């Protein structure tokens, strides 16, 4: 067995149907009494219902969370936090709302309770991406990782199927990259494989029966595991390309991950055969092609062109992706990345 280092990640997880009912007790378990509640405008009604349930433990609601954590939204939320007399934050939603809670905590060290409602995994990482004047930067800090996460699969029953599929593939991408991470270890690899298995079983069920609680539970369980991998080990080419396409070309987060995953996995497969062997087996032996077939079967978007990327954008995307070195199992060259992105642009099955 290869030598390894394992660093456990702190954080408390409360999982189960109806677990949102424990939010008040979890605020108290943090040693706090008044939470500023956060959501996007789309989840404002759910947030208001949660505020009613929390009674005096809800200091106020801020419902303007937005994708990529714009700093002007964070500043408005900081003002709301101070005015409300809150002593902690409670984020209800996906990566956008969780990002806002993290941005507040990074600035004022407020404890965070997160109720995660997508499969993106941000709730279990110490990573914060923020956007200022259109430029997205990413930082890591122990203050950023939420203290407590509630996973209540009942809250995901209404996550639209298209979003569920894209977000589920987003989670699977954390697991695939975690398997060949330079700092991968037996524990994160176990989590990655179990997370992949759970999502591979759950997502096809969700496409035909979105209200199937067992499938929703399994998908949320898988997304927790995959997110924990993201928060534990280094990511490589796939996450770099998604960061470039989201940050510099404005492509949507989950869909971009979903489309790129078969291509990035196929690109790296031959350079990481040992690390990816069990994952490849899960998808019929050929990881890139098998992931593409799986994504096509569950109705995922397949072509970056459909998200608005143009052929003329590819050379600049390659240039930005290669500007700074980072670890990746297969050597990165302009020609290699160009082929990968053109395949993803057109939506062809990787060979
Ligand atoms: P999102 O949070 O933007 O959610 C998309 C939309 O779906 C929002 O309108 C949201 O309110 C709505 N929604 C969420 N859950 C719902 C539910 N259960 N039912 C109905 N509607 C629901 O999407 P996302 O993909 O979860 O997050 C994307 C953002 O998170 C990006 O900015 C990305 O960079 C960030 N992210 C960060 C990390 C990290 O570790 N820092 C990890 C993953 C994603």
Image (tube, rainbow, N blue to C red):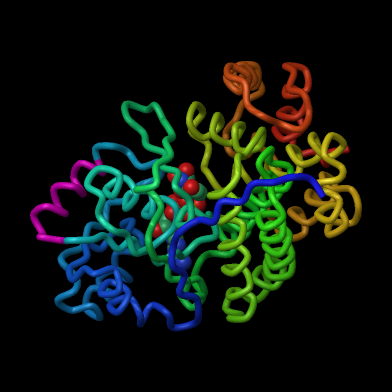
Q: Residue at x 10, y 60 (%)?
A: 85
Q: Residue at x 71, y 60 (%)?
A: 190
**On the picture, is 271 further left or further right than 308?**
right
Number of marks drawn? 0
Relative to residue 90, is residue 78 depicted above or below? above
Q: Quadrant of residue 26?
A: bottom left
**On the picture, is 126 further left or further right than 267?**
left
Relative to residue 71, is residue 331 depicted above or below? above
Which one is in front, 166 or 25? 25
**On the picture, is 61 further left or further right than 120?**
left
Q: Residue at x 83, y 59 (%)?
A: 282
Q: Quadrant of residue 336?
A: top right
Highlighted magenta segment, given as a residue range: 73-86
Which one is in front, 310 or 228? 228
Q: Quadrant of residue 14?
A: bottom left
Give percent across and percent down for residue 74. 25, 43
Q: Residue furthest right?
A: 285
Main SS, magenta region, reads helix
Relative to residue 245, is residue 154 depicted above or below? below
Give percent across and percent down for residue 83. 8, 54
Q: Quadrant of the C terminus?
A: top right
Give percent across and percent down for residue 122. 47, 52
Give percent across and percent down for residue 304. 65, 36
């Amino acid at each position: 067995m290869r030598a390894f280092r394992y660093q456990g990640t702190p954080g408390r997880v409360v999982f189960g149907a109806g677990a949102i009912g424990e939010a008040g007790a979890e605020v108290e378990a943090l040693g706090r009494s008044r939470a500023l509640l956060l959501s996007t405008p789309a989840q404002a009604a759910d947030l208001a219902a949660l505020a009613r349930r929390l009674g005096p433990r809800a200091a106020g609601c801020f419902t303007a969370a937005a994708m990529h954590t714009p700093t002007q939204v964070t500043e408005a939320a900081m003002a709301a936090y101070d005015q409300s007399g809150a002593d902690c934050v409670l984020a209800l939603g996906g990566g956008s709302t969780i990002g806002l809670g993290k941005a507040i905590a990074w600035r004022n060290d407020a404890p965070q309770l997160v109720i995660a409602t997508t499969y993106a995994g941000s709730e279990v990482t110490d990573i914060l991406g923020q956007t200022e004047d259109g430029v997205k930067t990413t930082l890591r800090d122990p203050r950023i990782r939420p203290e407590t996460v509630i996973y209540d699969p009942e809250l995901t029953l209404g996550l639209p199927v298209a979003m569920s599929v894209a977000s589920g593939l987003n989670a699977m991408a954390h697991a695939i990259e975690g398997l060949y991470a330079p700092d991968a270890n037996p524990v994160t690899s176990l989590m990655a494989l179990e997370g992949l298995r759970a999502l591979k079983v759950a997502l096809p069920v969700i496409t035909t029966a979105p209200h199937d609680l067992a499938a929703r539970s399994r998908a949320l369980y898988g997304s927790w595991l995959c997110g924990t991998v993201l928060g534990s080990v280094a990511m490589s080419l796939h996450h770099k390309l998604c960061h470039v396409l989201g940050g510099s070309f404005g492509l949507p987060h989950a869909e971009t991950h979903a489309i790129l995953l078969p291509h990035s996995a196929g690109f790296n497969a031959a350079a990481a055969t040992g690390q990816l062997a069990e994952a490849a087996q899960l998808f019929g032996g050929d990881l890139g092609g098998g992931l593409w077939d799986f994504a096509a079967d569950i109705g995922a978007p397949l072509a970056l062109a459909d998200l608005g990327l143009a052929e003329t954008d590819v050379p600049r995307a390659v240039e930005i992706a290669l500007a700074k070195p980072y670890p990746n199992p297969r050597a990165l060259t302009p020609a290699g990345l160009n082929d990968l992105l053109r395949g993803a642009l057109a939506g062809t099955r990787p060979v």
